[in-house]
Amino acid sequence: MQMTEPNLPEQPGFRLARGVARLLRSLDHAVLCEFVPSRGLRVDVISITPKGEIWIVECKSGRADFTADRKWQNYLEWSDRFFWAVDTDFPDDLLPPDTGLIRADAYGAEILRDSPLTKMAGARRTRLTRDIARTASIRLQALTDPVAGGQPERGT
């Protein structure tokens, strides 16, 4: 009988995101997975670097996953650097050359191609940093106190 790691996600995209998050933490980033920067958008991984840059990493498990993604260009305005994270079997030539490239698996990742820096406007950065902090704080509280970590209760 084969034992599985208890916290290892089953879905390929979630495995890639875990490996990416481990890489970014090793670079001293504050990392958040599954984040909504704006209505209709959901990024796989977003991080804040020690210098305050915002990085977005989209995890693609295969050709079909990549070609079905019609929203990725909308993520560019919500980051200073944009990366793709793919596994070793992914056809890298599909990815736009002016974006970053990370090779990942569930246990780690490596940056193969850096992303060009495109600085966000200050007001957008402030709002996004606040939203990331609030989301991370709510998720942390939900882990330690699921009742209080949910939606705020209205006055009785």
Image (cartoon, rainbow, N blue to C red):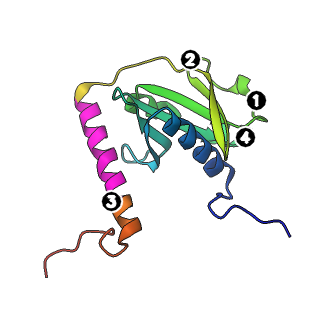
Q: Secondary structure at mark 1?
A: loop
Indicate the position of residue 126 as horizontal and vertical percent values. Answer: 24, 35
* Three-letter code for the amino acid on which mark 4 is drawn: Gly
Q: Which residue is mark 2?
A: 98
Q: Is residue 131 magenta?
A: yes
Q: Is residue 11 left or right of residue 36?
A: right
Residue 3 visible in the snapshot? yes
Q: Mark 2, residues whose alpha carbon is within 10 Å: few (<14), some, or many (≥20)? A: few
* Three-letter code for the amino acid on which mark 1 is drawn: Pro
* Three-letter code for the amino acid on which mark 3 is drawn: Ile
The residues bearing labels 2 and 4 have C-alpha atoms spaced at a distance of 19 Å
Q: Secondary structure at mark 2?
A: loop
- Exactly how many numbered labels are in the figure? 4
Which numbered circle lies on residue 62? 4
The residues bearing labels 2 and 1 have C-alpha atoms spaced at a distance of 16 Å
Q: Which residue is mark 1?
A: 91
Q: Earlier in the sequence, mark 2 or mark 4?
A: 4
